[in-house]
Image (tube, coloured by chain):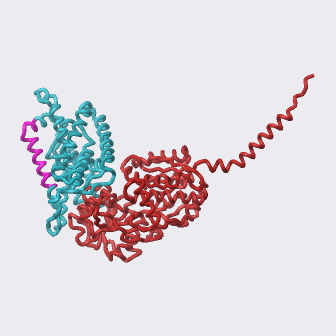
Chain colours: A cyan, B red
Amino acid sequence: MGVFAICLLNGISFGCILFLLASGLSLTLGLMGILNLAHGALYMVGAFVGWTIASHLGFSFWIAALSAGCVAGVIGLIMERGFLRHLNRLPNEQVLLTIGFVYIITNVCLWIWGSIAKPPYTAKFLSGAFTVVGWPYPFSRVAIIVVGLSVAFGLWWLQDKTRIGAMIRAGMDDREMTKGLGINLELTAAALFFVGAFLAGFAGVIGAQLIGANVGLGLDILLLALIVVVIGGMGSVQGSLIGAMMIGLVDAFGKILFPELAMFMLYFLMVIVLVIKPTGLLGRKV
Amino acid sequence: MKKKRSYGKLKFLLVSILTVFFVWAVWAAPTLAAEKPIKIGVCLARTGFFASLEAYIIDGLKLAFDEAGYKVAGRPFEVVWEDEGPGDPAFTMDKMRKLVESDKVDIIAGPFNSDLRLAALAYTSKMKKPSFAVVCDDEGSLKFPYNYAWSQTTFQEGRPVGWYAFDQLKVKTVNTIGGDWHAGHAFIEGFTQGFTKERQGKVLGQQFAPIGTTDFSSYVVAMKPADAIVVMSVPGDTGAFISQAHGMGAFKNAKVIVIGQAILPPMLAELGPKLIGNVWQDAEYQPFYKSPANDKFKELVQAKLGHPAGSFEGMGYSTGLVILEALKITKGDTNPDKIHDAVKSIKMDTPLGKLSFTPGNPDKSGVEGIMSHFIEVIKQGKDGYYWDLAYEYPSFKPAPIMK
């Protein structure tokens, strides 16, 4: 019973990290049709910036998280305004460009922070643990769950209950009509790209409580985020949440029940969803 | 009637010139050869993930070469530096071919990455180029002729950790978790042999996590109650595992033993408070190891590089010393068979301990170092946490893998 409860909580907490990362990717892909493969690199930047502010300089963990989000957001905005907006409807070029950004960002991080990994860090008041069915369970994982679900609620509310959200959804459904109605889709897209990149950097700090920061993180975490987007569907916050939870739980239980097959099971899940529903569980048709 | 020209004097002059030239060439050849510099090729990462780590090894090598004044046995030597690359064997092989066929190096050090090293050795042994590892080598490297695993292999490095756990820490049962790549398995296999076959310990659970695993909680949950947890992976994953496992209370009743020196000193700032008093790890180089060679090395690093000596500099510097010692024994002769015999005869003191070699096999493969291994433990000093020397296994001989 204890093992089941711990695995369930672990799966949910890991799923929340994936959601924070994948939601931004899903939104930019859904609205702008841009597959930003540098999204994982922005996560990595966030993790390193957060380490510098929270661990190295000793400032508040939450200030570190917000600052890391802003730094990643600015980098994302530069990428979008300076480069990606000129490659509209050129997916191959977008992919190549964003892969190039992965190498650039990774090497800049290597240059600034070095190749020695930074261990996980968290806020001081989250350092302890409480008991769940006889097992110690860290406060930091509970914080990840709370933050992840709060952001999920916030994004859902923004997308479904606000005018801005309506504009975003309209842009996803029909760009030309939306532009024709006088909505500044360029500005909306740029703002959304900033938000997506912000979420990636923010996720880097939240996830650093488990994973820390290292220069290999960009591509490792991107793969999982892509699987989440494929399963959940592009452009859907709810889909990203469901996809992330599925991946988190399959990962947590798979390592216990089928350790040799744990990595394979994630891809197997993705294949099943693609076969049954190619647009993802709650995806929009792009 | 035209007079017949006499070529007699011309012929005499020509023969004289040729004779003088021949005599001079025979007399001067050794001198010319002696002045031709020895070429040492170094193939280590300047780009990619390991670049900033291998920069320390490069610094160590440069210290050894600078100290020798770029001369050995009366002959000058020069170093050709090449980039092993970001982990692509095709890229590395291009560099190896350049070093061997274009730069015509006499000796090679590196690559660092074990996958690249195995690929490179298949080529350099065929070309009869003596090749020296810069850190502990892969067990598979021992089958290649003219390869010198002076710092032993990943498998051998795990064995004394098993002895230490059983003999000194009184650990009888362990769970192991290793990185799921070749070296990760080799380290754990070495530990398992040392702990269960060469001692009477028991491994209750053995798990391997892919490199880049982000969430280790399921691995922690799957562990059975045991006296210790043995960890071996890349530094990033090891740090993440230790942090997560500590948060889940896994270290409350179990000691932590790390193989492969995976917790690097800069990581102790965050991990020190969690680990102090309960974690040990093995080390190829230990700054507190007392020897004249190590004392000299530490002073050199502080003077030339401005910071305390570290493991990777120690390994680079010792690699340089071993190469130069082999060349001293051959009196500067770079014939690969003479270097091979010279390496086998080496007995020297390095910052990593006293070093000698096994005789190897008749086909010139299997030459491995006999040297010290260290166990270190975390202590807290006025400048923070650091690794202190806990135990030394001197003149530790490699042993065959027991099935």
- The image position of residue A55, as x and y in percent, is 22, 55
- The image position of residue A205, as x and y in percent, is 20, 51
* Relative depth, front residue between B330 and B28: B28
Q: Main secondary structure of the magenta part?
A: helix
- The image position of residue A47, as x and y in percent, is 24, 50
Q: Residue at the far top: name it.
A: B1
Is residue A227 visible in the rendered image? The answer is no
**Horizontal side, residue B304 vs residue B381: left or right:** right
Quadrant for the N terminus of chain A in the image: bottom left
Q: Is residue B12 above or below residue B145?
A: above
Q: Residue at the far front: name it.
A: B303
Is residue B27 visible in the rendered image? The answer is yes
| Span of residues in magenta | A144-166
Q: Residue at the far right: name it.
A: B1
The quarter holding residue B226 reads bottom left
- The image position of residue A170, as x and y in percent, is 12, 34
Task: Answer whether residue A264 is magenta in the image.
Answer: no
The quarter holding residue A140 reads bottom left
Residue at 54 percent across and 60 percent down: it is B325
Residue at 10 percent across and 45 percent down: it is A156
Task: Answer whether residue A154 is magenta in the image.
Answer: yes
* Relative depth, front residue between B371 and A97: B371
- Counting labels gives 0
**Horizontal side, residue A241 vs residue B238: left or right:** left
The quarter holding residue B255 reads bottom left
Residue at 87 percent across and 31 percent down: it is B6
